[in-house]
Image (spheres, grey):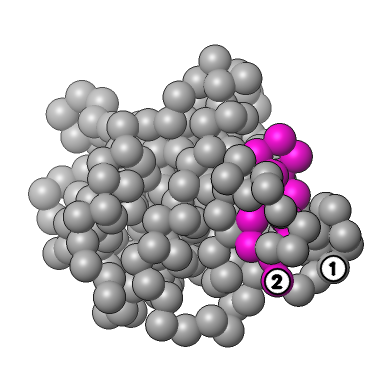
């Protein structure tokens, strides 16, 4: 069997002296693993860094085999991350969550496109990409079957002044409808309901991370899973930096 596709590298593991096992998120074939055999050298090892996008040809005798990859580099996004500790922590979290929690060989075309869009944004020097990362986590949740509805208030139906999210239903709540219950609700940062918001402060970023963290943990705990340590390290670093 044989197919051609493009793929985002999620993990790269040494196998022997000069071979690798790659896990990639492909456009048409979902998350898929395969060998790169006897072709990895010091000169070309940069091709196989996580976050890079490859042109792939996969071959295998049977469809359910691990199979072999022939790879050509399309775009190296990894260089946007390696010179900045926070960016690198984000990349590790981004790749490891997809590698750990997406089932093998199921189609995720929308997530693939959103993941590529995120990698492009990280090239900017400001911290807008942190907002993009949080939006990506919401889309990742939706792909796992646990979408959060931020379109209107669950109580009144209004689309304005959305300020909270119910931890039970994952639906937005307006400030006027929250009432005495607001201490039990999760804060909803404005940038998640209005993409035109600028001058986003650190508190808004923290609120966004807390929101996605809650629902990721809630969903994964039902499956007996935990968030990877790479994400914890990324979040801890966000708390340390000055975004203002």
Location of residue 107 in the rendering, given as x and y in whole percent from the top left corner: 69, 44
| 67 left or right, relative to 128 | right
> Residue 134 has which mark?
none
Report crowding for label 2: few under 14, some 14 to 19, many 20 or more residues within 10 A (C-alpha): some
Location of residue 116 in the rendering, given as x and y in whole percent from the top left corner: 50, 63
- Disc 1, disc 2: CB below 8 Å? yes
**Residue drawn at 83 percent across, 53 percent down:** 154
- As displayed, is residue 237 above or below residue 116? above
Location of residue 31 in the rendering, given as x and y in whole percent from the top left corner: 56, 39
State the quadrant of the N terminus: top right
Say how many tags the image has. Answer: 2
Highlighted range, magenta = 161-174
Whether the magenta-drawn stretch holds residue 164 is answered as yes
Q: Is residue 104 visible?
A: no
| 173 left or right, relative to 130 | right
Residue occupied by mark 1 = 158
The residue closer to the viewer here, 20 or 79, is 79
The residue closer to the viewer here, 18 or 133, is 133
**Residue drawn at 75 percent across, 39 percent down:** 169
- For label 1, the SS is loop
Residue occupied by mark 2 = 161
- As displayed, is residue 150 above or below residue 244? above
């Amino acid at each position: 069997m044989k197919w051609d596709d493009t793929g985002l590298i999620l993990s790269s593991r040494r196998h022997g002296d000069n071979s690798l096992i790659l896990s990639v998120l492909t456009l048409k074939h979902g998350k898929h693993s395969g060998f790169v055999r006897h072709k990895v050298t010091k000169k070309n090892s940069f091709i196989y860094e996580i976050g890079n996008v490859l042109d792939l040809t996969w071959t295998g005798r049977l469809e359910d085999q691990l199979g072999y990859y022939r790879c050509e580099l399309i775009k190296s996004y990894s260089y946007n991350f390696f010179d900045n500790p926070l960016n690198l922590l984000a990349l590790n979290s981004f790749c490891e969550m997809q590698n750990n929690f997406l089932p093998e060989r199921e189609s995720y075309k929308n997530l693939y496109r959103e993941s590529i869009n995120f990698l492009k944004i990280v090239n900017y020097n400001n911290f807008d990409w942190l907002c993009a990362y949080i939006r990506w986590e919401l889309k990742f949740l939706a792909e796992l079957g646990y979408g959060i509805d931020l379109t209107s208030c669950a109580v009144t139906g209004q689309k304005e002044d959305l300020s909270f999210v119910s931890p039970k239903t994952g639906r937005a709540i307006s400030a006027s409808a929250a009432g005495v219950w607001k201490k039990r609700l999760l804060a909803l940062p404005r940038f998640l309901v209005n993409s035109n918001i600028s001058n986003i402060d650190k508190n808004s970023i923290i609120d966004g991370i807390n929101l996605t963290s809650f629902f990721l943990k809630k969903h994964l705990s039902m499956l007996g899973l935990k968030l990877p340590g790479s994400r914890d390290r990324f979040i801890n670093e966000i708390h340390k930096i000055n975004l203002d």
